Image (cartoon, helix red, strand yellow):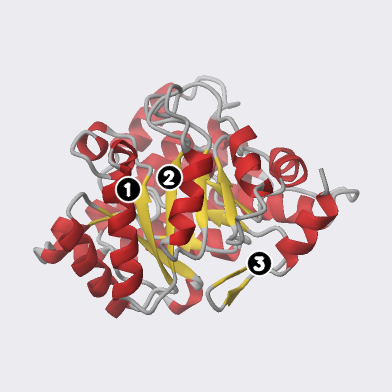
Amino acid sequence: MNYQLFYTFAIKMKIGEIEFGSQPVFLAPMEDVTDIGFRLLCKRFGASMVYTEFVSAEALIRDVKSTIQKLTIADEERPVGIQIYGRDIEAMVEAAKIVEQAGPDLIDLNFGCPVKKVAGKGAGAGMLQNIPKMLEITRKVVDAVKLPVTVKTRLGWNHEQLIITSLADQLQDCGIQALTIHGRTRSQMYTGTADWTLIGEVRRNPRIHIPIIGNGDITSAEEAKAAFDTYGVDAIMIGRATFGRPWIFKEVRDYLDHPSSETSGFSFNQKLDILEELLRLNVERIDEKRGILHTRRHLAATPIFKSIPNFRQTRIAMLRAETMPELLGILEDTRRLLG
């Protein structure tokens, strides 16, 4: 395998007119996770590109307020993509036009979400059972907007239908400017282990000239480097490993840029400062109730509390707190306890 070829290509990676440096690392779009506060933190810590929570095309064209609010982006987080999903061709086209007016740097089509309420209705990964419709949606969205259009999908519906190698060719022919591949099938949901071998096969296909972004089970800087070195992808995308850990982008970036150097991580107090800032950002940019709800997911998942003995009752109180002063008080009590 010619890794030097892959490395050279990665340096020149572009999506439309968006230029990235060597081995870019993206934040995956995730419902109830990648709100604007979290995106801003991930960007600060080195995310090369961030994405909004995914947006329902049907809700968007019905002008649902909570969906419209997801289109809010800040200049500090650019480049930023807005991802849409749906099963109706006309709705997806109309939604893409609405999204374009919000001013993102690209529009991503979600053909990978495996959850029942999305895939079970034929949207997201459900499109893997109707490839002609997936391709028609993609072509028509590409033709309808001036922004770069990208796609995120999976290896196939199940292990009997691993279609990604041929599907990548077909999607490229539709005019997309990058393809993100999650290394699982829809039937796997998020279980088992992501299989990157087919992602690497797509990248090695000489007919593929668009950037290929690998996604699935990247939880450390070492795994990120191995994904680039072994499979030759042009970028990687990190999803669940960012929960309560936006600093993972700095860890990955430092290791990719200086693999032979020792890098010092953040202390417990510094990480707690970051999570408290996330709370403040979410409350400021959303509102107190929903800002706390959005932050709870990160507080529940963050690894920084896992080594604290007898933390169960504090964790319960932390996840039940309903006001910002109450939650900040619990976090500060935890800081003093360990100080």
Query: Looking at the rendering, which quadrant does residue 335 occupy?
Result: top right
Q: Is residue 47 left or right of residue 8?
A: left
Looking at the image, residue 237 sits to the left or right of residue 157; the answer is right
Which residue is denoted by mark 3 in the rendering?
13
Q: Quadrant of the C terminus?
A: top right
Which amino acid is tagged 1? Answer: Asp
Is residue 325 toward the left or the right of residue 106 in the image? left
Q: Is residue 176 visible?
A: yes
Residue 34: horizontal and vertical position, in percent? 40, 54
Residue 290 versus residue 39: which sits nearer the camera?
39
Task: Give the x, y percent position of residue 238.
Answer: 55, 46
Q: Label 2 neighbourhood size at 10 Å, few (<14), some (14-19), many (20+)?
A: many
The amino acid type of the residue labelled 3 equals Met
Tag 2: residue type?
Thr
Q: Are marks 3 and 2 in contact (CB under 8 Å)?
A: no
SS class, disc 2: strand
Q: Position of residue 236 (x, y in %)?
A: 61, 50
Label 1: which residue?
32
Q: Nearer the viewer, residue 47 or 209?
A: 209
Residue closer to the observer: 121 or 138: 138
> How far separated are the C-alphas under marks 3 and 2?
20 Å
Q: Earlier in the sequence, mark 3 or mark 2?
A: 3
Q: Nearer the viewer, mark 3 or mark 1?
A: 3
Residue 187, label in figure: none
Residue at 70% from the left image edge and 50% from the top image edge:
252
* For marks 3 and 1 on the same chain, the one whose residue lies earlier in the sequence: 3
Q: Nearer the viewer, residue 131 or 72?
A: 131
Q: The N terminus is located in which quarter? A: top right
Whether residue 243 is visible, yes or no, is no
Which residue is disc 2 drawn over? 153
